[in-house]
Amino acid sequence: MNPFAPWRHPGRLLKAGSRIALGLPMGIITFTLIVTLGVLSVGLMPLFLLGIPLAWITFMTSRVLGMIERSRAAAFDDEHIPRPTPIGLGGGRLDP
């Protein structure tokens, strides 16, 4: 086993290193945004006019962050992850 084998392909090594380096900041940003917005929307739910729009913003933010993560997977792993389809449009059934 050659310990210098990864250095033969520096592009692949750089690609893997950049994926790992971007994983932590993206995780911190995602966790902070979703938890903060989710807790605020639940906490402001008694004030009906503030809780509902904030919950909608939370869901839209999570959708955008999901699109960013799918694009990262496509860029770094050469893997295409399809967008989720809404439940009402054939993405899933509610009745058995």
Image: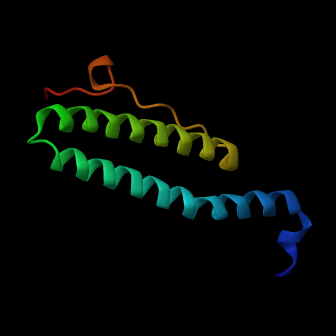
Observer-nearest residue: 22 or 14?
Answer: 22
- The spot of residue 54 in percent (x, y) is 27, 38
Q: Residue at the spot x=32%, y=17% of the render?
A: 89
Q: Would you say 82 lies left or right of 34 here?
A: right
Q: How many marks?
A: 0
Q: Picture quarter containing residue 1? A: bottom right
Q: Residue at the spot x=40%, y=41% of the render?
A: 62
* 83 vs 74: above or below: above
- The spot of residue 79 in percent (x, y) is 62, 42
Observer-nearest residue: 83 or 63?
Answer: 63
* Furthest-left residue in this view: 46
* 13 vs 29: above or below: below
Q: Would you say 12 lies left or right of 64 here?
A: right
Q: Picture quarter containing residue 36? A: bottom left
Image quadrant in which the C terminus is located: top left
* 81 vs 89: above or below: below
Q: Residue at the spot x=51%, y=32% of the render?
A: 82
Q: Would you say 79 lies left or right of 13 here?
A: left
- The spot of residue 40 in percent (x, y) is 24, 49
